[in-house]
Amino acid sequence: MRAPRGSALVAAAFAAVVALAAPAPARAGLFDDDEARRAILDLRKQLEQSNEQARVRQSEQMTQMSAQIDQLKRSLLDLNGSIEAQRADNAKMRGQMEQLARDVAELQRKQTDLQQGVDERIRKVEPQKVTVDEKEFSVDPEEKRSYDDALAGFRRGEFDRAATGFGGLLKRFPNSGYRQSALFWLGNAQYARRDYKEAIATFRSLVASAPESPRAPEAMLAIANCQAELKDIKAARKTIDDLLKAYPKSEAAQAGRERLAALR
Protein backbone atom coordinates (compact mmCIF):
# COMPACT_ATOMS: atom_id res chain seq x y z
CA MET A 1 0.00 0.00 0.00
CA ARG A 2 1.12 3.60 -0.64
CA ALA A 3 1.67 5.61 2.56
CA PRO A 4 -0.27 8.84 2.89
CA ARG A 5 1.51 11.82 1.38
CA GLY A 6 1.53 13.72 4.71
CA SER A 7 3.31 10.85 6.47
CA ALA A 8 5.93 10.73 3.72
CA LEU A 9 6.62 14.42 4.11
CA VAL A 10 7.00 14.01 7.88
CA ALA A 11 9.42 11.17 7.36
CA ALA A 12 11.40 13.16 4.84
CA ALA A 13 11.58 16.16 7.18
CA PHE A 14 12.71 13.96 10.05
CA ALA A 15 15.38 12.40 7.88
CA ALA A 16 16.61 15.83 6.86
CA VAL A 17 16.84 17.02 10.43
CA VAL A 18 18.71 13.90 11.44
CA ALA A 19 21.04 14.34 8.56
CA LEU A 20 21.74 17.93 9.52
CA ALA A 21 22.26 17.02 13.16
CA ALA A 22 24.56 14.07 12.48
CA PRO A 23 28.28 14.76 12.69
CA ALA A 24 29.47 14.62 9.14
CA PRO A 25 32.58 16.53 8.40
CA ALA A 26 32.02 16.21 4.68
CA ARG A 27 28.59 17.95 4.91
CA ALA A 28 29.30 20.54 7.59
CA GLY A 29 30.08 23.17 5.09
CA LEU A 30 27.03 22.52 2.87
CA PHE A 31 24.19 23.52 5.22
CA ASP A 32 24.00 26.02 8.01
CA ASP A 33 21.34 26.33 10.70
CA ASP A 34 19.15 28.79 8.78
CA GLU A 35 18.88 26.62 5.78
CA ALA A 36 17.94 23.68 7.96
CA ARG A 37 15.19 25.68 9.67
CA ARG A 38 13.88 26.90 6.34
CA ALA A 39 13.81 23.36 5.02
CA ILE A 40 11.93 22.20 8.09
CA LEU A 41 9.44 25.09 7.82
CA ASP A 42 8.91 24.37 4.15
CA LEU A 43 8.28 20.74 4.87
CA ARG A 44 5.94 21.63 7.74
CA LYS A 45 4.06 24.03 5.46
CA GLN A 46 3.75 21.35 2.80
CA LEU A 47 2.58 18.91 5.45
CA GLU A 48 -0.08 21.35 6.70
CA GLN A 49 -1.21 22.05 3.14
CA SER A 50 -1.39 18.34 2.45
CA ASN A 51 -3.41 17.76 5.61
CA GLU A 52 -5.72 20.64 4.76
CA GLN A 53 -6.27 19.29 1.28
CA ALA A 54 -6.99 15.89 2.77
CA ARG A 55 -9.49 17.43 5.20
CA VAL A 56 -11.12 19.35 2.36
CA ARG A 57 -11.41 16.24 0.21
CA GLN A 58 -12.74 14.26 3.17
CA SER A 59 -15.27 17.00 3.92
CA GLU A 60 -16.33 17.07 0.26
CA GLN A 61 -16.66 13.29 0.23
CA MET A 62 -18.69 13.35 3.45
CA THR A 63 -20.90 16.11 2.05
CA GLN A 64 -21.37 14.19 -1.16
CA MET A 65 -22.09 10.98 0.75
CA SER A 66 -24.57 12.80 2.99
CA ALA A 67 -26.31 14.21 -0.07
CA GLN A 68 -26.47 10.73 -1.58
CA ILE A 69 -27.89 9.32 1.66
CA ASP A 70 -30.49 12.10 1.78
CA GLN A 71 -31.39 11.42 -1.83
CA LEU A 72 -31.68 7.71 -1.06
CA LYS A 73 -33.91 8.48 1.95
CA ARG A 74 -36.12 10.68 -0.22
CA SER A 75 -36.29 7.94 -2.85
CA LEU A 76 -37.24 5.40 -0.20
CA LEU A 77 -39.89 7.72 1.19
CA ASP A 78 -41.27 8.29 -2.32
CA LEU A 79 -41.25 4.54 -2.94
CA ASN A 80 -43.05 3.84 0.35
CA GLY A 81 -45.57 6.54 -0.53
CA SER A 82 -46.14 4.95 -3.94
CA ILE A 83 -46.55 1.51 -2.35
CA GLU A 84 -49.06 2.82 0.19
CA ALA A 85 -50.96 4.65 -2.55
CA GLN A 86 -51.03 1.44 -4.62
CA ARG A 87 -52.26 -0.52 -1.60
CA ALA A 88 -54.99 2.04 -1.04
CA ASP A 89 -55.98 1.84 -4.72
CA ASN A 90 -56.01 -1.95 -4.56
CA ALA A 91 -58.13 -1.92 -1.41
CA LYS A 92 -60.53 0.53 -3.03
CA MET A 93 -60.71 -1.61 -6.15
CA ARG A 94 -61.36 -4.73 -4.08
CA GLY A 95 -64.13 -2.91 -2.27
CA GLN A 96 -65.65 -1.81 -5.58
CA MET A 97 -65.41 -5.34 -6.97
CA GLU A 98 -67.02 -6.81 -3.84
CA GLN A 99 -69.82 -4.25 -4.06
CA LEU A 100 -70.23 -5.01 -7.75
CA ALA A 101 -70.44 -8.73 -6.95
CA ARG A 102 -73.12 -8.02 -4.32
CA ASP A 103 -75.02 -5.83 -6.79
CA VAL A 104 -74.85 -8.54 -9.46
CA ALA A 105 -76.04 -11.19 -6.98
CA GLU A 106 -78.93 -8.98 -5.89
CA LEU A 107 -79.84 -8.27 -9.51
CA GLN A 108 -79.78 -11.99 -10.30
CA ARG A 109 -81.98 -12.70 -7.26
CA LYS A 110 -84.49 -10.07 -8.33
CA GLN A 111 -84.44 -11.40 -11.88
CA THR A 112 -85.07 -14.92 -10.60
CA ASP A 113 -87.93 -13.69 -8.39
CA LEU A 114 -89.37 -11.75 -11.32
CA GLN A 115 -89.13 -14.76 -13.61
CA GLN A 116 -90.75 -16.98 -11.00
CA GLY A 117 -93.51 -14.42 -10.61
CA VAL A 118 -94.04 -14.30 -14.37
CA ASP A 119 -94.05 -18.10 -14.58
CA GLU A 120 -96.53 -18.28 -11.71
CA ARG A 121 -98.84 -15.77 -13.41
CA ILE A 122 -98.55 -17.71 -16.66
CA ARG A 123 -99.41 -20.95 -14.88
CA LYS A 124 -102.47 -19.28 -13.41
CA VAL A 125 -103.88 -18.34 -16.82
CA GLU A 126 -102.32 -20.84 -19.22
CA PRO A 127 -104.46 -23.93 -20.01
CA GLN A 128 -103.03 -27.19 -18.71
CA LYS A 129 -103.32 -30.70 -20.11
CA VAL A 130 -104.68 -33.35 -17.75
CA THR A 131 -105.78 -36.97 -18.08
CA VAL A 132 -108.78 -38.16 -16.07
CA ASP A 133 -110.62 -41.47 -16.52
CA GLU A 134 -108.55 -42.33 -19.63
CA LYS A 135 -109.42 -38.99 -21.23
CA GLU A 136 -106.91 -36.21 -22.00
CA PHE A 137 -108.06 -32.60 -22.26
CA SER A 138 -107.02 -29.02 -21.49
CA VAL A 139 -108.40 -27.14 -18.52
CA ASP A 140 -108.22 -23.68 -17.04
CA PRO A 141 -105.91 -23.51 -13.98
CA GLU A 142 -108.80 -22.36 -11.80
CA GLU A 143 -110.91 -25.19 -13.16
CA LYS A 144 -108.21 -27.70 -12.24
CA ARG A 145 -107.81 -26.21 -8.78
CA SER A 146 -111.57 -26.51 -8.13
CA TYR A 147 -111.63 -30.16 -9.21
CA ASP A 148 -108.52 -31.08 -7.22
CA ASP A 149 -109.85 -29.38 -4.07
CA ALA A 150 -113.23 -31.11 -4.32
CA LEU A 151 -111.65 -34.53 -4.92
CA ALA A 152 -109.23 -34.03 -2.03
CA GLY A 153 -112.19 -33.21 0.21
CA PHE A 154 -113.98 -36.41 -0.85
CA ARG A 155 -110.88 -38.52 -0.13
CA ARG A 156 -110.67 -36.98 3.34
CA GLY A 157 -114.28 -37.93 3.97
CA GLU A 158 -115.46 -34.31 3.79
CA PHE A 159 -118.52 -35.20 1.70
CA ASP A 160 -120.40 -31.92 2.19
CA ARG A 161 -117.39 -29.97 1.01
CA ALA A 162 -116.85 -32.37 -1.89
CA ALA A 163 -120.46 -32.13 -3.03
CA THR A 164 -120.33 -28.34 -2.87
CA GLY A 165 -117.04 -28.29 -4.79
CA PHE A 166 -118.14 -30.61 -7.60
CA GLY A 167 -121.51 -28.88 -7.87
CA GLY A 168 -119.84 -25.48 -8.13
CA LEU A 169 -117.42 -26.79 -10.78
CA LEU A 170 -120.26 -28.11 -12.94
CA LYS A 171 -122.12 -24.80 -12.72
CA ARG A 172 -119.10 -22.62 -13.40
CA PHE A 173 -117.65 -24.85 -16.15
CA PRO A 174 -120.64 -26.69 -17.68
CA ASN A 175 -118.60 -27.87 -20.66
CA SER A 176 -115.54 -28.86 -18.62
CA GLY A 177 -113.51 -31.92 -19.53
CA TYR A 178 -113.96 -32.83 -15.89
CA ARG A 179 -117.75 -33.07 -16.31
CA GLN A 180 -118.05 -36.88 -16.40
CA SER A 181 -115.67 -37.41 -13.49
CA ALA A 182 -117.23 -34.54 -11.53
CA LEU A 183 -120.73 -36.09 -11.96
CA PHE A 184 -119.45 -39.46 -10.79
CA TRP A 185 -117.78 -38.11 -7.65
CA LEU A 186 -120.68 -35.76 -6.93
CA GLY A 187 -123.05 -38.74 -7.02
CA ASN A 188 -120.78 -40.66 -4.64
CA ALA A 189 -120.62 -37.69 -2.24
CA GLN A 190 -124.43 -37.47 -2.30
CA TYR A 191 -124.69 -41.22 -1.68
CA ALA A 192 -122.29 -40.88 1.28
CA ARG A 193 -124.54 -38.14 2.66
CA ARG A 194 -127.55 -40.46 2.09
CA ASP A 195 -129.05 -38.07 -0.42
CA TYR A 196 -130.08 -41.08 -2.50
CA LYS A 197 -132.58 -39.36 -4.78
CA GLU A 198 -130.11 -36.62 -5.66
CA ALA A 199 -127.41 -39.23 -6.20
CA ILE A 200 -129.70 -41.19 -8.59
CA ALA A 201 -130.33 -38.04 -10.61
CA THR A 202 -126.63 -37.27 -10.77
CA PHE A 203 -125.62 -40.79 -11.84
CA ARG A 204 -128.37 -40.90 -14.48
CA SER A 205 -127.11 -37.59 -15.88
CA LEU A 206 -123.67 -39.15 -16.27
CA VAL A 207 -124.95 -42.29 -18.00
CA ALA A 208 -127.24 -40.32 -20.30
CA SER A 209 -124.62 -37.76 -21.35
CA ALA A 210 -121.64 -40.12 -21.62
CA PRO A 211 -122.65 -43.79 -21.99
CA GLU A 212 -119.16 -44.52 -23.35
CA SER A 213 -117.49 -43.26 -20.17
CA PRO A 214 -115.58 -45.87 -18.16
CA ARG A 215 -117.51 -44.54 -15.17
CA ALA A 216 -120.94 -45.29 -16.72
CA PRO A 217 -121.14 -48.95 -15.56
CA GLU A 218 -120.20 -47.93 -12.02
CA ALA A 219 -122.79 -45.16 -12.14
CA MET A 220 -125.53 -47.68 -13.07
CA LEU A 221 -124.49 -49.97 -10.22
CA ALA A 222 -124.54 -46.95 -7.88
CA ILE A 223 -128.08 -46.15 -9.05
CA ALA A 224 -129.16 -49.69 -8.15
CA ASN A 225 -127.55 -49.34 -4.71
CA CYS A 226 -129.38 -46.03 -4.11
CA GLN A 227 -132.71 -47.68 -5.13
CA ALA A 228 -132.00 -50.55 -2.77
CA GLU A 229 -131.34 -48.07 0.04
CA LEU A 230 -134.72 -46.49 -0.77
CA LYS A 231 -136.31 -50.00 -0.50
CA ASP A 232 -137.24 -49.90 -4.20
CA ILE A 233 -136.03 -53.44 -4.88
CA LYS A 234 -137.93 -53.76 -8.17
CA ALA A 235 -136.28 -50.68 -9.58
CA ALA A 236 -132.88 -51.81 -8.31
CA ARG A 237 -133.25 -55.22 -10.02
CA LYS A 238 -134.25 -53.56 -13.31
CA THR A 239 -131.29 -51.20 -13.16
CA ILE A 240 -128.91 -54.12 -12.66
CA ASP A 241 -130.53 -55.98 -15.58
CA ASP A 242 -129.94 -52.91 -17.75
CA LEU A 243 -126.32 -52.81 -16.52
CA LEU A 244 -125.76 -56.44 -17.48
CA LYS A 245 -127.18 -55.83 -20.93
CA ALA A 246 -125.27 -52.58 -21.60
CA TYR A 247 -121.93 -53.49 -20.05
CA PRO A 248 -121.84 -57.27 -19.65
CA LYS A 249 -118.03 -57.56 -19.44
CA SER A 250 -117.46 -54.72 -16.97
CA GLU A 251 -116.38 -55.16 -13.38
CA ALA A 252 -119.54 -53.33 -12.37
CA ALA A 253 -121.57 -56.01 -14.15
CA GLN A 254 -119.87 -58.75 -12.14
CA ALA A 255 -120.56 -56.86 -8.94
CA GLY A 256 -124.14 -56.32 -10.18
CA ARG A 257 -124.70 -60.05 -10.55
CA GLU A 258 -123.65 -60.55 -6.94
CA ARG A 259 -125.86 -57.68 -5.86
CA LEU A 260 -128.77 -59.09 -7.88
CA ALA A 261 -128.47 -62.42 -6.06
CA ALA A 262 -128.65 -60.61 -2.76
CA LEU A 263 -131.82 -58.82 -3.88
CA ARG A 264 -133.76 -62.01 -4.60
Image (tube, rainbow, N blue to C red):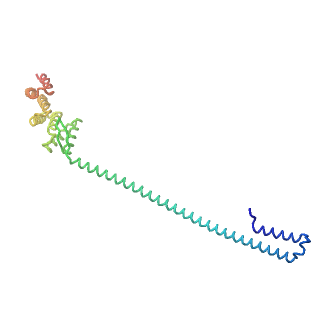
Vertical order, 202 against 54 (above or below): above
Vertical order, 23 against 141 (above or below): below
Q: Report x, y in % for residue 169.
A: 16, 42
Left-right relation of 80 to 101: right
Vertical order, 111 against 197 (above or below): below
The residue positioned 49% from the left and 60% from the top of the image is 86
Whether residue 79 is visible here, answered yes or no, is: yes
The residue positioned 28% from the left and 51% from the top of the image is 115
Q: Report x, y in % for residue 69.
A: 62, 65
Screen quadrant of the N terminus: bottom right
Screen quadrant of the C terminus: top left
The residue positioned 52% from the left and 62% from the top of the image is 82
The residue positioned 17% from the left and 39% from the top of the image is 136
Looking at the picture, tell me which residue is in the foreground, 45 or 158: 45
Looking at the picture, tell me which residue is in the foreground, 264 or 248: 248
Q: Quadrant of residue 77?
A: bottom right
Looking at the picture, tell me which residue is in the foreground, 39 or 187: 39
